[in-house]
Amino acid sequence: MKKLFLILIFTSLIFGIEYSKKEQQFLKNHPVIYISAMTYWPVDKNGESFHTNYIKLLNKYGHINLQPVFYQHWENGFDDAKKGITNGIMALSYSKQREKWFFFTKTYNYHPYYLIVNKNSDIYSLQDLKNKTIAIAKNSILREVFKNPDFKIISTKNAFKKIINNQLDGIMLFYVNDINKNKYRIIKVFIDKNGEEHIGINKKYPELYSIISKIMKTIPYNEIESIRNHVYKKIKIEKVFTPKITLKDLITKKDILFLSIFSIGLIIIIFLVLTRKFLNFQMKNFFISIFIFNSFIIGFIIYEILVFNFYSNKILEIKSKSFNSIYLISELEDSIINLNHIFLNKYSKQHANIKKLFKHHTIKADNLLINKKTLKYLINHSKFTSLELTHIATIKNQIEKLLKLQQEVLNNKTNIQIYKQQYILVINYFKKIKQLIKKENLTEIKMIQEKLKYQFLLLIFSAILFIIESIFVFIMIKKKLYNPITYLTNIIQMYKKGKNITKKEYQYKDEIGDMIDEFISLQHQLNQNLNELKQHKKTLEKQVKEEVDKRIYQEKILLKQSRLALMGEMIDAIAHQWKQPLNAISLHLEILNLDKENIDKHYIEKFIHDINLQMKHMISTLTEFRNFFRDDKEKELVCIKDVIDNSLILLKDELIKNKIEIKKDIQKNFCIEAIKTELEHLIITLITNAKDIFNERNIQNRYINIKSYEDDTYFYLEIIDNAGGVPEDIKDKIFDLNYTTRKDGTGVGLYLASQIAIKHMGSLEVKNTQNGACFYFKIRK
């Protein structure tokens, strides 16, 4: 089912239209596309015009939403399309001026123009319009066709009523719908280049133009012909002889080549499936073979689609050529009818001028004007086939005879009836040549239609072949990939459940078969290795535990050693701190002994107060010292400001003694779960390390900046000095155990400080600043 689904998707992609990213974005931004349409177009029994039906075809094949906006007057629909209020307009004839506003699609329809006059009017042809007033719609292409007419052109409302009231001589328009034949007469029907109908797309929407152009290429001509026949009358054509078409006329060498390859390929695939020999093929060769065969089938399908499209367009081209040929013949026939009408008027002594129907007023067949072109100009191979030209040459000779008879009738040398017989002969000849053109083109169309049927059958055949081949390929892939993978999965599940798996060689010798055999062998070897690993694991766990205990013990010894080293310095600092309060107490006792006689109650109270102050200072110093060296390993919530303040109390006199200025910048007093004394140890170590560097390098102005802050991820504590910084070549070593640059150093202080940072899920790092070193402790929030 999945394979069938993929085939359907692939087929839809082949037959679908591929839009560019810009075109897709345009369709997304314009879920509904509006286009100008007219209410006066002829409609079929369903009330649909040819153009609205064509819009439905565009929607069907392009999967778009094109909607007509109807206008009663051509000018309004044209103006809205020109301004971009609608996206374009249907049934637009080409002109150079209109190119300023519109893109023109290829021609999708041909339509004549009509001249409507009062039934009693004396106008019978275009030549009779001199000094007349004719209504033509504003912006109509006819205004460009008749640029310098000898009649007046206006645009007006209620034109048909004005014709009845003789206020207007005629209307020239594109479509005739429900004309009252008792009141009006259609005296002229003609088609030229301006009769080609395009879809005009406003130039603001180039993506829509490319979308419509792509869709028009995909619409089959038979569908266009079908909707045309619902609206326009079908031309009645007599049955003609259809030549016998054999398979030899239809089949090509490419078809034979493709069919041979497909047949051989399908036989090979069926043979491989039945014999199961494909299971021993290497994967690379197997998939390359499948890919090549599929490529041939897909290539043939695409080829057939292109051929099918070519023949469809060919039929459209032939019908278009036939239409144009018959149109030119009809125009020539109209010219002869008009010539006859003017001649009969002249013969009946009415005012008529035959010469105006000829170029340079030279009355001969070659100079006969047909849509402002001469007969000589029309008789060429670009407009007619050789056979058609032969018959037109005959018509030309008949016209020469007709013109000669006219002169003889006017000179009373021939009877008018002889002229009329010649005229009827010429007119009948027009009917014959029209029928000839229809037959000639119908024969060619019949041949192409047979080719289309044959190509369609080939397309269906190749699609069926593709489906059959896909089914066999699915079976092959299932047996070659799915079945062995399922077998391997079952073995793995058995192994997970602890079941014993006996070695069994897989049936086929491709990569998967080799892999299964190798897997089973490795599985047995793995079981043996696992038993050995269990024994090693027990031994290793014991060794690891011993090493961890040893490491913890060593770190405890190092921490105690570091504290003892600090203790020596701090005892000296405490002794220095106690010296001043002890001296003050001694001094007070001496004064008390010397001035016994003047002692009063107030003096005794002041003496006791001063002694208490000195005792409190000594007790506070002793308490901080005692707390620092207490073995308290329980974590608690501590705030960094308290840790800094307690550390500075312990180092107060040492800092004064060494003339070190402390600057505090507590931007964030962050609190963390920690062992308070260990954090104090870290800070004291860093400050003591800076003090030693100050003394070693004999720095004069000494300061240490203690700063705490945060960012989105971390809390930071920085201790920055101006002692000159850490040399770059040792910066990566100073936190190593037993590494020191001082003679009396132990190499333990900074190592323990870094271990304390790591123990608290943080890190201790160093970087050089402009004047010294910056040690910073960072911990993730």
Image (tube, helix red, strand yellow):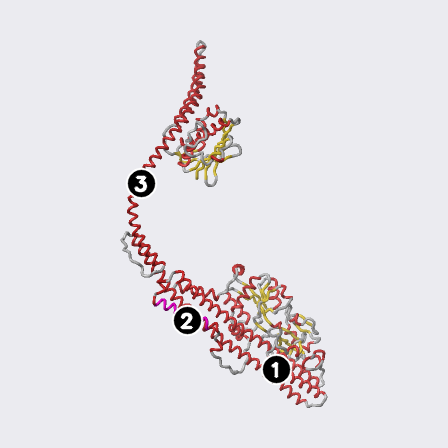
Discs 3, 2 touching: Cβ within 8 Å: no
**In this picture, is 458 found above or below 648?**
below
Residue 29, x across and y down, in percent:
53, 59
Cα separation between marks 1 and 2: 50 Å
Left or right placement of residue 98 versus residue 674 in this view: right
Q: What's drawn in magenta, residue-wise?
A: 256-274
Q: Is residue 90 left or right of residue 621?
A: right
Marks 1 and 2 in Cβ contact (< 8 Å)? no
Q: Which residue is mark 3?
A: 541
Label 1 element class:
helix
Q: Which residue matches tag 1?
A: 390
Does dot 3 land on a helix, a strand or a loop?
helix
Q: Earlier in the sequence, mark 3 or mark 1?
A: 1
Question: Residue 241 got which mark?
Answer: none
Amino acid type at mark 1: Thr
Q: CA distance from mark 3 to mark 1?
A: 110 Å
Mark 3 packing: few (<14 Cα in 10 Å), some, or many (20+)? few
Q: Residue 121 in the image: state x and y as whole percent.
A: 67, 79
- Disc 2 residue type? Ser
The answer to whether residue 326 is visible is: no
Residue designated by label 2: 263
Q: Nearer the viewer, residue 523 or 594?
A: 523
Q: Is residue 145 left or right of residue 486?
A: right
Q: Classify mark 1: residues with Cα within 10 Å, few (<14), some (14-19) or many (20+).
A: few
Hey, which quadrant is residue 560 in on the image?
top left
Q: Residue furthest top?
A: 597
* Position above or below: 114 against 704: below
Is residue 554 in the magenta section? no
**Kind of residue at disc 3:** Glu
Residue 260 among those drawn in magenta: yes
